[in-house]
Image: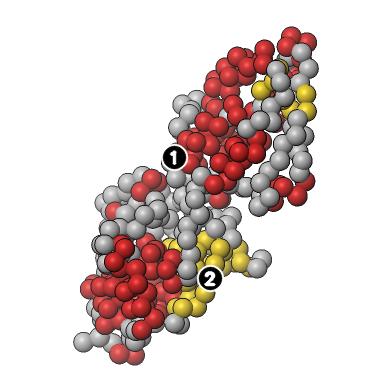
Amino acid sequence: MADKKNEIEPIEAKFEDIVDAIAPRISGAAPLNGNNFNTLGGFSVEKAAPSVQLALDLGVQVEKNVNGIEMGVLENGMPYLTQSGLSRMSGAARSTVQSITQEWQEGFSDPIQPKGRMSFFKKYLFEKGYNEPRLFLEISKNGSPHYAYPDIVCMAFIEYFAFEAQNTNETALSNFRNLARFGLQEFIYKALEYTPADKWKYFNDRVSLLKDSAPDGHFILFRETNSIAVDLITADLPVNEKTIPDISVGLAWGKFWTDNKLEEKFGPRVKYEHNYPDYYPQSLSNPQKPWAYPDEALAIFRRWFRHVYLTTKFPKYILGKANVLKGGKLEAEQIAQMYIENKIEK
């Protein structure tokens, strides 16, 4: 028999309306563009996962209270529930959600196989690739810390209180059955009327603006470094106004150019007009005036880019962007390994 004092009534009309509205087009398929925690590597429940903190320098794209459930989407498209929203969805008292959250954090690095409810949570989340020492993401909202439980964590809570808890409840069971049809991510997206942005938009719009901007007889670094952006986007990683690798390349190559007095060999570099799309914060200082380099230096640039920048400088750059990646530092290190086997420049 469920403990009635800790039970919250199942979500009714609003939730069902959303489910019925989107179920036909989902057709039972798993949601696209889900949280790709599996890219962070597999972890066995037989051993403790490494202590990696998921820290996101991301704002809230949208957050609303939908029929009493606080939910939102981060700037990178990650859906979440607040602790209050998770309490409503799982049918558990908020104090119980907080207790499990604290228990996870305190026992995360313990190599001993956990007992009780932590056995379920560790098995469930590790098998899905979630290996963070906290069950929530700490982000900034209006200058203050803000705690968001990602959808994969929320589903663990809902399933636990539907089937595994000592006192299961009908709220969790009802919501689990509804969400099993398509996933919590799609529910949150639909409830908030949120449409994920085209992941290629930031990059493609810059390509369009810069396609004819190279001065005659010169090359520009944006065009020569497109391979980085394409690789990152293909790997479902963010390339936007916060991750602009050609700026990093420009600074490093400019120093190499002057330190090695390449102008004496190839001729002078020249300024050209570079504009960012108007939705980039950088567009406020348009037009930019970066350097274009003589075509005669293109071969040496390509050698430098492949053998110097990608192997020693790009890893340092991407590690500096770890806080805008879903997987934090661990994901940044894995991106670096796309290009490097050498020692990362300090």
> Residue 346 at what x, y percent from top left?
61, 32
Mark 2: secondary structure:
strand
* Amino acid under disc 2: Glu
Which numbered disc covers residue 222?
none
For the N terminus, the quadrant is: bottom left
Q: Is residue 264 above or below residue 338?
A: above
> Residue 61 at what x, y percent from top left?
56, 63
Residue 87 in view of the camera: yes
> Residue 303 at what x, y percent from top left?
57, 17
Q: Are marks 1 and 2 in contact (CB under 8 Å)?
A: no
| Mark 2, residue position | 63
Mark 1: secondary structure:
helix
Q: Is residue 324 above or below residue 206?
A: below
Residue drawn where x is 56% and y is 41% of the image? 204
Residue 256 in view of the camera: no
* Amino acid under disc 1: Thr
Residue drawn where x is 54% and y is 22% of the image? 306
Residue with the most extreme bottom position: 5
Q: Is residue 230 above or below residue 109?
A: above
Q: Is residue 261 left or right of residue 300?
A: right
Q: Residues within 10 Å of mark 2 (few under 14, many from 20)?
A: some
Res 309 → quadrant: top right
Q: Residues within 10 Å of mark 1 (few under 14, many from 20)?
A: few
Q: Is residue 1 left or right of residue 227?
A: left
Frontmost residue, 125 versus 218: 218
Frontmost residue, 246 versus 211: 211
Q: Is residue 103 left or right of residue 76?
A: left
Q: CA distance from mark 1 to mark 2?
A: 28 Å
| Mark 1, residue position | 234
Frontmost residue, 188 versus 114: 188
> Residue 73 at what x, y percent from top left?
50, 64
Q: Earlier in the sequence, mark 1 or mark 2?
A: 2
